[in-house]
Image (cartoon, rainbow, N blue to C red):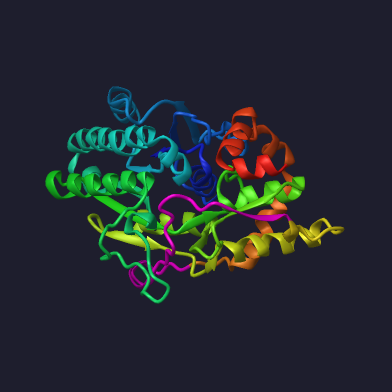
Amino acid sequence: MILVTGGCGFIGSAFILDWLAQGGEPVLNLDLLTYAGHLGNLRAVESDPRYRFVHGDIADGTRVAALLGEHRPRAIVHFAAESHVDRSIAGPQAFIHTNVVGTTRLLQAAHEHWSRLPPGEAQAFRFLNVSTDEVFGSLGASEPAFTEAHPYQPNSPYSASKASADHFARAWCHTFGLPVITTNCSNNYGPRQFPEKLIPLTIHNALAGQPLPVYGDGLQVRDWLHVGDHCAALRAVLERGRPGETYNIGGRAERTNLEVVHTICGVIDEARPGRTHAELIRHVGDRRGHDRRYAIDGSKIARELGWQPAVAFEQGIRDTVQWYLANAGWVESVTSGAYRRWVEQQYPALNAAA
């Protein structure tokens, strides 16, 4: 079996659903169920005998060690993280606790587990550390995309905490021999993404006829990766990736934030005719320290593991909008009073104008 941390979140739940759909072995899902983790994300497999959920914190080393001893997973796929830049600016300590302290305690428990495995099982064991391209900092408009050799230059508390986790993962591999592989992905999108990130927030607000906030001039560039493509890449890394290596995972879809919002509006115009949803766009004050551009060079994973993205951005956005249209109940379940208070706090100018 495999242990997945943070499996009730957006990417973690997508990975578990995809893993089981592809016929993978049993999954143990360890998740603390913070605001962005939802058991409903995995309702489709909750009765699957190959799936088990455990409510717990990766920073609880004793609990993690007990789970590893009981279930003896042959791999750990580590998604659990605080992941929203805006929230890291408002409250950095939670990011340090989960992304740094939690990851190091997980690494320590994994190392102790791995050290006790028979030689054959120890050789096959993998610790997959799922990270982000944000650890590399910001690119200029004409600079080449991030390669795995790009220096770390994190600019937000979120990216600094993930960079720290990556460095500790490397240290546990180099110093203690733990077979760690790290992946650095670009911005994910797709079904079941908590509506605080750009794409689900824009979809949610547009469908409700609410303002669509765009930071600054909206010309910040991101490389967009469909979560289904990300899951396929992670399967390839887990199966064929080399311990001690890092692999960049990108969608080959650089777009400005403003282009993304206009693309979503065009799709919703077709689905809900009667208004031009781009009229709802409102430029708001820029995020502090906002990185200007991210871009991924995915040539290494294509060359070594034979993976490349398959979902074109425009089709992926269309499919994502259709999912949110068809799953209004899920959206209602996650946009609680706490969510609404967060949005009001994050975009006060829009609330004042309303």
Say if the magenta span includes residue 289: yes
Is residue 98 toward the left or the right of residue 274 in the image? left
Say if the magenta span includes residue 178: no
Which one is nearer the viewer's eye here, 34 or 255? 255
Query: Residue 271, position in %: x, y?
Result: 80, 58
Query: Please, is residue 155 above or below residue 260 in the view?
Result: above
Query: Residue 139, position in %: x, y?
Result: 37, 67
Kindly indicate the quadrant of the structure image that contains residue 30. Answer: top left
Query: Residue 4, position in %: x, y?
Result: 41, 39
**Which residue lies most toward the bottom here?**
142
Which one is nearer the viewer's eye here, 166 or 119? 166
Q: Residue at x 31, y 47 (%)?
A: 160
Query: Residue 199, position in %: x, y?
Result: 60, 53
Is residue 82 toward the left or the right of residue 209 in the image? left
Q: Is residue 267 visible?
A: yes
Query: Please, is residue 190 above or below residue 149 in the view?
Result: above
Q: Residue at x 36, y 67 (%)?
A: 301
Is residue 14 toward the left or the right of residue 270 in the image? left
Q: Quadrant of the C terminus?
A: top right
Q: Is residue 1 visible?
A: no
Q: Quadrant of the N terminus?
A: top left
Q: Which residues are magenta?
A: 280-308
